[in-house]
């Protein structure tokens, strides 16, 4: 694996390709691109052999080696099972431990949020997300 995938578009693209080369991934449309040497976007879907789909959108800052914003959604068919986002909810004290990172879960998926301490702006989140999908739903 690459030392710090958030260091450049080339490093992040190689990181994605290496990470998704695994038996549990059926195929993917996830790609990273940039119109600047300092920033990028990663966007697309990862389709798993267990029938799940991970939709990814990340805004990347290669100069500061950060994920500036993100959204990760997990689907089975057309049904959204859960999602992670970084939209701040400062008035929800239950989310303060991982602010602003949190996960939306059923029931009432839009309003039912839990902390997401494993999600970060300073490290790549895709390994955590993929491991969760494979551990919880099988490969």
Image (cartoon, rainbow, N blue to C red):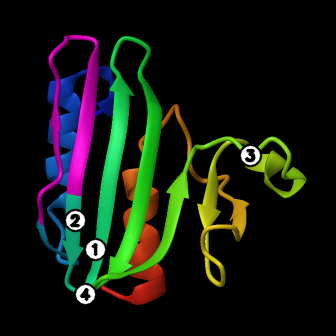
Disc 4 to disc 1, C-alpha distance: 7 Å
Q: Is residue 2 magenta?
A: no
Label 4 sits on a secondary structure element that is: loop
Disc 3 is placed on an element classified as loop
Q: Is residue 137 above or below residue 11?
A: below
Provide residue 93's location: percent of width, then percent of height.
89, 51
Query: What is the magenta range?
Result: 28-44
Mark 3 vs mark 1: in front: 3
**SS at circle 1:** strand
| Residue position marked by numbered label 1 in the rendering | 53
What residue would you read off at disc 3? 89
How far across and how far down the image is residue 56, in percent?
32, 53
Q: Residue at x 20, y 84 (%)?
A: 49
Tell me the mark number nearer the camera, choosing from 4 and 3.
3
Q: How many marks?
A: 4
Gap in Å between the C-alphas at discs 1 and 2? 6 Å
Q: Looking at the image, is mark 2 or mark 3 earlier in the sequence?
A: 2
Residue to which mark 2 is pinned: 46
């Amino acid at each position: 694996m690459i030392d710090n995938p958030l260091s450049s578009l080339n490093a992040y693209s190689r990181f994605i390709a290496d990470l998704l080369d695994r038996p549990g991934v059926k195929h993917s449309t996830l790609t990273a691109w940039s119109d600047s040497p300092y920033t990028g976007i990663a966007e697309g879907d990862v389709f798993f052999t267990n029938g799940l789909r991970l939709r990814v959108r990340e805004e990347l800052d290669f100069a500061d080696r950060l994920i500036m914003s993100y959204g990760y959604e997990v689907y089975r068919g057309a049904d959204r099972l859960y999602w992670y986002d970084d939209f701040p909810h400062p008035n929800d004290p239950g989310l303060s431990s991982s602010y602003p990172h949190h996960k939306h879960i059923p029931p009432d998926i839009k309003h039912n949020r839990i902390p997401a301490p494993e999600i970060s702006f300073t490290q790549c989140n895709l390994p955590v997300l993929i491991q969760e999908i494979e551990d919880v739903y099988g490969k």
